[in-house]
Image (cartoon, grey):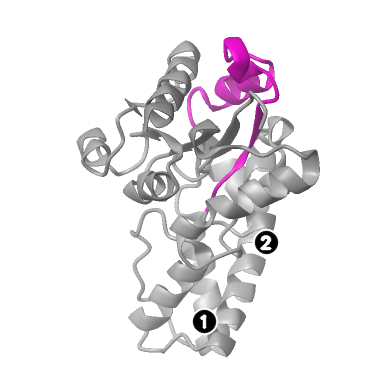
Amino acid sequence: MGDGLLVLWDIDQTLIVTSGVATEAYAEAVHATIGQDWRGDMSYNGLTERAMAARILRQHDVEPDPEVLARLLANVERALLDRTEATRTRGRALDGAHAALAAIAGGGLAGPAGNGTRQSVLTGNVRSVAEMKLRAFDLHTWVDFGIGAYGDDEFERNALIPHAWRRAEARYGQRYSPARTVILGDTARDVEAALAHDAAIVAVASGTTPAESLREAGAQVVLDDLADTTAVLVAIQDAVKIATRG
């Protein structure tokens, strides 16, 4: 194992916001899949796309058997990608997102953590949508999508981290220990996913989950936002120290 870190970012409400585009895409996909008008609820933070799609089907009184779930997911992916321009014009990168990604990519983490550190995403989005969202706001430059973990990898977010480890080792021949894997996300599910694998966690209260709720979920390092780049780098290092102590 090397000295570097594997830094894995959540996307929605951690790096960007999209201002209702996802709900519109789901409404279109639901109608295309089961012929019903939208009466769902998207307010379930941190779910993978597969888990969200299953929940939405049940909200429309349809059981998510594998065939209908696959059709809905395909329609959701298409509807979201069709809204690339809407994502760009109605959404935005959150304050500090560009600077934080650039600082980490530029070796801003002091000491051994800066050597061999790589960045990707750990997200509920399927990969094509994850790439679209970060490209829409020019955040993709600093992210290696080939070593990320996505909502089409697993149903539960807690199961995603091993996919990133496997891909990083296959791509670079480098194994990252749990304590040198850092998750940054805005929901309790991000915190739970990190803790399930003994990874480091920096929770960011930039979404709808308050800082206190993130702490109650188990995050010892919590930021209000990413606006202070130095604070983000310090938080990552603090989270690694906590994870290393176990």
Which residue is found at the position 44% from the left and 56% from the top? 158
Please report contact status of discs 2 and 1: CB closer than 8 Å, yes or no: no
Please give the label number shown on residue 82: 2
Residue 44 left/right relative to 121: left
In reply to whether residue 122 is colored magenta, the answer given is yes
Q: Is residue 197 a member of the stretch shown in magenta?
A: no
- Given the image, on which type of amino acid does mark 2 rest? Asp
Start-end of magenta stretch: 94-123
- Would residue 132 be seen by someone viewing this image from the given angle? no
Q: Residue at x 41, y 75 (%)?
A: 56
Crowding near the residue tagged with mark 2, few <14, some 14–19, many ≥20 C-alpha atoms within 10 Å: few
In-front residue for pair 151/217: 217
Residue 184 x/y as whole percent: 47, 36
| Residue at x-position 68% and y-position 19% | 115
- The residue labelled by disc 1 is 31
224 relative to 161, above or below: above
